[in-house]
Image (cartoon, rainbow, N blue to C red):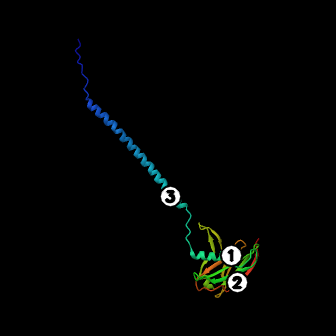
Amino acid sequence: MSSDKVTAPAETDPLAVFSAFLANQLAKPVQNATSATQDLSKVEAAVVQNSTRAVVEEVKTAPPKVERDELQEILNDYVLTHDFGILEGQCVFKLEEFTCAKTRKQITIGAHGCKDYGLNLQLYMNPSDWSNNLERTFKVTDANGVVLKQNNLLSSSPLSTQYTQVMFYLAPKNNRFGFMMSEGSRKSLANKTRWVYDP
């Protein structure tokens, strides 16, 4: 007969086992929810970062806004729409100078109708007026500020205390010009023209 002592297995409290199991199961959804929340936060942060980058890039690449210039618009309208009474294809140049009724500015505009010849125009201006009173010159731009048409000013040279010689070229496809001077400025003192073959 054996004398070895048999040790009974330790008793386990069924309630304690069930409580541990239940606590473990309840912890899993919390862990999963926390992980999902963290993932969502990462996605939201990436979206915000990409949106911010897109806005910055748009600001960088957007063309500069061209502010409205009422005086420039008035001068351009005179140059482009004034009826000089010149027939299309007629090699005649006409110069007109007057005071704008709306702004009281001194306006000088001119045009020709020749298709195969350009025109060299020399105006003789009062030096002080040309140096100090010139406010606008004919220039048409698009919405992005790109110049479409403008005066072709060749040179401006003081000849004496009485005269400044200003030279323009009016090409067949850019056959109008003009400028605006401040109120009280004098008209051109004289002018000379010369036709240049330019088909």
- What's the distance in space between the residues labelled 2 and 3, CA to CA? 54 Å
Decide if residue 165 is on the left or right side of residue 196: left
Q: Position of residue 51 (x, y in %)?
A: 49, 55
Q: Amino acid at mark 2?
A: Asn
Say which quadrant the N terminus sits in.
Answer: top left
Q: Is residue 52 above or below residue 94?
A: above
Looking at the picture, tell me which residue is in the foreground, 77 or 180: 77
Label disc, if present, on residue 55 of the rendered structure: 3
Residue under the point 46% across and 53% down: 48
Q: Quadrant of residue 127?
A: bottom right
Q: Nearer the viewer, residue 94 or 186?
A: 94
Whichever of callouts 1 and 2 sits on the residue coming sooner in the sequence is 1
Name the residue beneath numbered marker 2: 191
Camera sees residue 137 = no
Identify the residue under disc 1.
176
Whole-percent x, y for residue 5 in the image: 23, 18
Q: Which label's residue is closer to the chain start, 1 or 3?
A: 3
Taking the view exactly as shown, the residue that stands out farthest to the bottom is 162
Q: Residue 195, position in %: x, y? A: 76, 77
Disc 1 versus disc 3: distance between alpha carbons? 42 Å
Secondary structure found at label 2? strand
- Alpha-carbon span between mark 1 and mark 2: 16 Å
Name the element at disc 3. Answer: helix
Relative vertical location of residue 3 with respect to residue 111 in this rendering, above or below = above
Amino acid beneath label 3: Val
Quarter the C terminus occupies: bottom right
Q: Amino acid at mark 1?
A: Arg
| Quarter-of-image position of residue 92 | bottom right
The answer to whether 66 is drawn above or below residue 131 in the figure is: above
